[in-house]
């Protein structure tokens, strides 16, 4: 195996997605070991499409195009947060599902992260604002400026979170593993 082939085998591309029904953020990073760099990030504008069905079709087409162009090794998505508006939640879940289906159709592994986990991974504070996340990403990736649409930086945060947690057991708590699970869920363990 050549030196270039070995290096290419260690490099991974991660697509991060911040699902949305009016604006969907996406970001691609390339990683090698602990190193990472930005390939591309931006937003998919969906507000101009009249029906929810047409928005879903456009999400599928755009995500498919990104997958075909960059051939990511994995896809990371921000899990929808629970809100009071059930209809909004349903639409957001559909948008996320369509993006997931595009990746799964190409047999690309997907991972979901809670908004709190993403913020914690990037800033050290699970309750950080979108602006704080964007500012930290600007520092980490040496970005000249923060985009107007923070959905793009949210997607970048999801991709970076995946890089930080890739290969680890995922849990909802502070640390992964059975010991952590038992400590956090004493009522769910039979003795």
Image (spheres, rainbow, N blue to C red):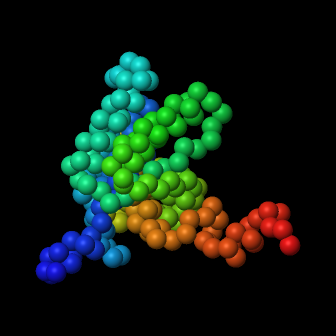
Residue 15 rendering spot, x and y as whole percentages: 34, 54
Q: Quadrant of the N terminus?
A: bottom left
Residue 79 located left or right of residue 68: right
Instruction: Determine if residue 153 is in view.
Output: no
Residue lying at the far right of the rendered structure: 191
Res 99 quadrant in image = top left
Q: Residue at x 25, y 72 (%)?
A: 9
Instruction: Determine if residue 28 is in view.
Output: yes
Q: Residue at x 63, y 69 (%)?
A: 174
Q: Residue at x 45, y 36 (%)?
A: 95
Residue 111 located left or right of residue 31: right
Residue 153, relative to residue 185: is it above or below?
above
Residue 91 rendering spot, x and y as whole percentages: 51, 31
Residue 5, relative to residue 144: is it above or below?
below
Residue 64 rendering spot, x and y as whole percentages: 29, 42
Residue 89, relative to residue 7: is it above or below?
above
Residue 58 rendering spot, x and y as whole percentages: 33, 31
Q: 27 or 5, which is in the foreground?
A: 5
């Amino acid at each position: 195996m050549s030196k270039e082939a070995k290096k290419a085998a260690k490099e991974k591309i991660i697509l991060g997605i911040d699902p949305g029904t009016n604006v969907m953020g996406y970001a691609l990073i390339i990683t090698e070991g602990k190193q990472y760099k930005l390939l591309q990030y931006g937003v998919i504008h969906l507000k101009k499409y009249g029906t929810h069905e047409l928005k879903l079709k456009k999400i599928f087409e755009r995500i498919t195009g990104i997958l075909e162009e960059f051939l990511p090794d994995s896809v990371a998505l921000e899990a929808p947060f629970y809100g009071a508006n059930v209809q909004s939640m349903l639409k957001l879940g559909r948008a996320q599902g369509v993006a997931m289906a595009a990746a799964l159709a190409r047999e690309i592994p997907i991972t979901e992260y809670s908004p709190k986990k993403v913020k914690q991974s990037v800033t050290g504070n699970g309750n950080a604002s979108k602006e704080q996340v964007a500012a930290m990403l600007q520092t980490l990736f040496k970005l000249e400026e923060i985009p107007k649409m923070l959905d793009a930086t949210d997607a970048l945060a999801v991709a970076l979170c995946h890089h930080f947690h890739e290969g680890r057991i995922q849990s909802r708590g502070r640390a992964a593993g059975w010991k952590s699970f038992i400590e956090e869920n004493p009522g769910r363990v039979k003795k």
